[in-house]
Amino acid sequence: MDFLSSTAFWVGLVKIAWINIILSGDNAVVIALAARTLQPAQQRRAVLFGSGAAVVLRVALTVVAARLLALPWLQIVGGVLLLWIGVQLLAEDEDEGDGTAAHAQGSLGAAVRTILLADVVMSLDNVIAVAAAAGGSTLLLVFGLALSIPLVVFGATLMVRLMERFPFIVAGGAALIGWVGGETLASDAVLADVAAAHHGLHTAAAAAGALLVLAVGKALQARSRARSAGT
């Protein structure tokens, strides 16, 4: 096959692999945070379903991603949504529940909904980056999307295990979602002129998003604990 001897093909392949390694981390963190309080069997289902959903969304968004990101207010809405998700995941009660099947099913449903919402926002940037690296090659684009599956599954599974052993990683994961949310919000088309005039806007918005998620999430967590202690 001619493409196997093409330098451009292999350079594009390396670019796509590297982009996937970097960008799949966000999705893996969201999936791990949403699945961390489930029973082990439910965790596996949430990770597999969430990872598969992330890839399906990337495929579906491949054609329209660039146009969607150009729409005013869309990324502001997406950024606010990610901030809300980060707060909810951090504020979530960390108890594992009563172990009944009904409770496990409810938790799995909530986890899947959270994963899907976050995937919709996060997959837009991922698709554009992979499509740009593919340089118009359908084969490279398909490879890039296929590579997302094992990376997200492995990353999410690893993150769940780390969060179980080191609970402080949960706060770090929530802060990362807040960082991405703030950055997404500041990238909206309506703020293009402001961003051009203030080069530090994206970093400032990202840092503010991370701090907001940590502050609000911890406050809600403390209120929940106080309420539990009073009953």
Image (cartoon, rainbow, N blue to C red):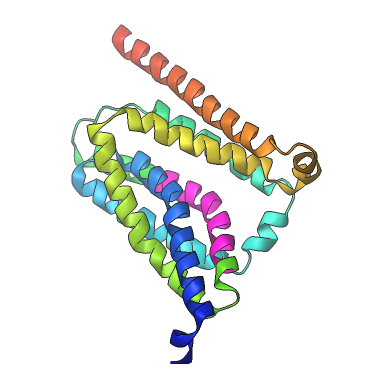
Residue 167 placement (x, y as % from top left):
29, 29
Looking at the rendering, which quadrant does residue 32 occupy? top left
Q: Where is 183 relative to 90, above or below?
A: below
Residue 120 placement (x, y as % from top left):
52, 53
Q: Which residues are magenta?
A: 112-131
Image check: 80 left or right of 200?
A: left
- Which residue is at 43% across, 49% downward? 27
Compare residues 201 and 34 and report the one nearer the observer.
Answer: 201
Judged by its main secondary structure, the magenta piece is: helix
Residue 57 placement (x, y as % from top left):
49, 61
Quadrant (top left/top right/bottom left/bottom right) for the C terminus:
top left
- Which residue is at 54% across, 41% downward? 180
Q: Is residue 75 visible?
A: yes
Residue 43 placement (x, y as % from top left):
26, 46
Looking at the rendering, which quadrant does residue 224 occupy? top left
Q: Is residue 37 visible?
A: no
- Which residue is at 32% across, 56% downward? 153
